[in-house]
Every structure is written in C-alpha cells, then in structure tokens.
Image (cartoon, rainbow, N blue to C red):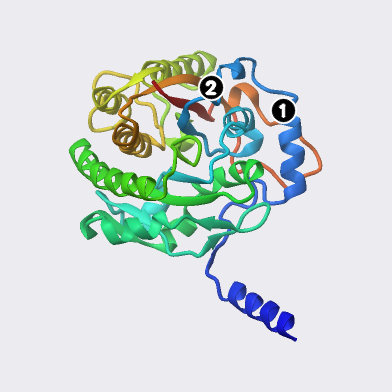
Amino acid sequence: MKTVIIICLVIIQLSAQNIRPVRDEVGFCWRGYEMDSLISWLDNNSLENTRDFKSENLVAAISPHDDYLYAGKVYSPLYKLIKTKEVVIFGVTHGTVRKEINDPSDVIILDSFDRWKCTYGNVGISPLRERIKKEIPSRYLMINDKAQSLEHSIEALLPFLQHYNKDIKITPIMVTRASFAGMDSLSSFLAGVITKYIKDKNLIPGKDIFFLISSDADHYGEDFSNSPLGLNTDAHLKATDNDKRISETYFKGELSKEKIFNLTSELWPDTIQDKITPLWCGRYSIVFGLLTTIKIIHDITGKSLSGNAVLYSDSWTNGVIPLKGTHMGITAPFSLKHWVGYLSAGFYLR
C-alpha cells in the first residue's frame, strides 16, 4: 500500500511540473532511436579535420543551431567531448522572438520551467538558474517563459548534449542586444554569481560544468535581405571565406577581452565600416558568452583560454545529410539565393 501511495505522489508531482515544450519539431531530433541513428551516421561520415577537437582542458565552445540534416557534421565532433554534469548555455534572441517580446536589450532572459522536453526524457534545470535570478541586479534580468518557448537556439543543442549524458542539467540564458560596455558590466555580475556557485559546489570547469554558446554564421541571400556580393558561386565563395577568416582570427589562439571587443567590429552592424557585413545570429551571444566565460575561468583557475579547433560548413556546400527513416526534415531551402553558414569552436585552458 505504501508503495502505491509513493508512486501516486510521484505521478502527481511530475504531472504538475511546468515543462518547456519543443519549438522546432522538424529541424531537430526528438526520438531517441532516431538520434542514435543520426549519431551512428555522423560517426561514420565525419569532416576530415575533426581530429583537431581534443577533450583535455576543453571548458567552453561555440555550437551551431541549424537543422541537423544541414549542420550535423559540425555539431557531432564537439558534443562527444562534452560529458559534464551541467552546461551553461548562452542562446540567441532571434528577431522573430524579439518582435513578440517588445525587443528588450541590455538584459539576459531566463525562464521558470521545471524541465525542458527532450529526446531521451525531460532535461533538468541546474540550481544555478535560481541563484542567478536572486543575485543578478533586476535591471539586467528578464524572466520570460514565452521568449524561451519561442526561441530555438538553445533547444537545438539539447539532443546532442543528452545523447552523451542522459542526466545533463542546463542553465539556459538568452542574450539580448547591448553595447560592449553594457555586456562587460553584465558579464561581470553573471561571472561573479557563477564563480561563487562553482566554488560552493566544488565543481571543476570542463569536468563538472561546461559553457556553450549557440550561434550560426552568415545568413546569406534574398530571403535575409543580405546579398551584397551577388547571388552566384563567386559570391558564395567570398562570403564563406569571410566567415572562415573571422573564425580563424577570433576563435583560434589566446582569447582576451581586447580580442572579443575587436570581434564586434566584424559582427555588430553599428560598428562595421567598409567590410562585408556577415549576418551572424549569434553576434551578441558569442561576445557575451565569451566575456562571461573568460572571467569565470580566470577567477576559478587563474588561467586564460585558447581556441584550438574550428569546424566550418554551410548549407549550400554540403546540402542535406542523406539519412533516411526519421521524422527530421529541413526548415528552410538551400541555394545560392539562400544559405546559412555554421561553425563549432572549442576553447581550452591555457
């Protein structure tokens, strides 16, 4: 009788939980056996330079969030190295979401969901999220479940994370537009909260907690009102070469505040002069996520970070992964008039 009562209480408790639903049911994979099939295919068809990704001292990374059938080869080599207990995720606040929530700026957006629906069962939330809510000045913080429900840049990362660690817990943070000075100030507050949490819990960066930044690279073509070089193969080559140049310049070698600041002159529309204007959706999440992470790592370890691995591809070059027998599809076309670049980069303790 006691066992029956306990089971009933557990069922009631679970049914009462506030679960964040899936936003994109097409581009990402929400069935375990299908995710297993995708990973198996990717393991046998990896990009040539994936050997550059190493697990030792890896504490942070940039990940794409495009459809798996486009960007799977760029996701896969990174995620098999992430096996920490929890992950802090810096997500994008896409334009479609900003329109729905009155385009906030100078804040981070958190949610109040108990768990997030995912591929192998619901994903848990780290207690770090509630600490941030309590300790970050209110002027820097927005709690908005609608925003997190509409945004796909964080959920895209979860099936890969969960595949390699079924008990993963996340701290989902949406990043909004801000000046560099504003981001520097907010990132210091956030880094202070996370550093204290890490020390209180005796966590080790890279072993127990990881920092993951969500971003796709250039969105090129008529549908994005972004085709300054034209719409032919030459334009595609120049634009993807520019993406690669940015990645190689800023995500390889020692990472510093000055280097992150210089990145804004490449990605932020109001700072770019006489350059190709790449339309990266993670132009704010990357800057804020890297600023926060280097401060945390310095406070915890006294060390700096160095980027040692960058993978790049785009939807036009590689097209659709020929994986059959799943519910996955593509959410947008690929052509010289519409393509998206994506990258993954790893950051290591120096």
Residue 132 in picture, x, y percent from top left: 33, 55
Answer left or right for 181 relative to 171. left
Residue 10 in picture, x, y percent from top left: 64, 75
10 Å crowding of disc 2: few (<14), some (14-19), many (20+): many
10 Å crowding of disc 1: few (<14), some (14-19), many (20+): some
Residue drawn where x is 44% and y is 51% of the image: 172
Picture layout, residue 100 above or below residue 73:
below
Residue 69 in picture, x, y percent from top left: 66, 35
Along the viewing direction, whichever of 160 and 153 lies nearer the viewer? 160
Picture layout, residue 49 above or below residue 322:
above
The three-letter amino acid code for the residue at tag 1 is Asp
Residue drawn where x is 75% and y is 31% of the image: 41
The three-letter amino acid code for the residue at tag 2 is Leu
Residue under label 2, please give it.
311
Q: Residue 309 carries which label?
A: none
Residue drawn where x is 31% and y is 38% of the image: 292
Along the viewing direction, whichever of 196 and 104 lies nearer the viewer? 196
Residue 53 in picture, x, y percent from top left: 56, 21
Q: Which mark is residue 43?
A: 1
Answer left or right for 208 relative to 267. right
Picture layout, residue 301 above or below residue 54:
below
Answer left or right for 345 relative to 173. right
Which quadrant is the N terminus positioned in? Answer: bottom right
Answer left or right for 170 relative to 191. right
Q: What element carries label 2?
A: strand
Q: Which residue lies furthest to the right in this view?
A: 325
Q: Is mark 1 on a helix, strand or loop?
A: helix
Residue drawn where x is 64% and y is 23% of the image: 318
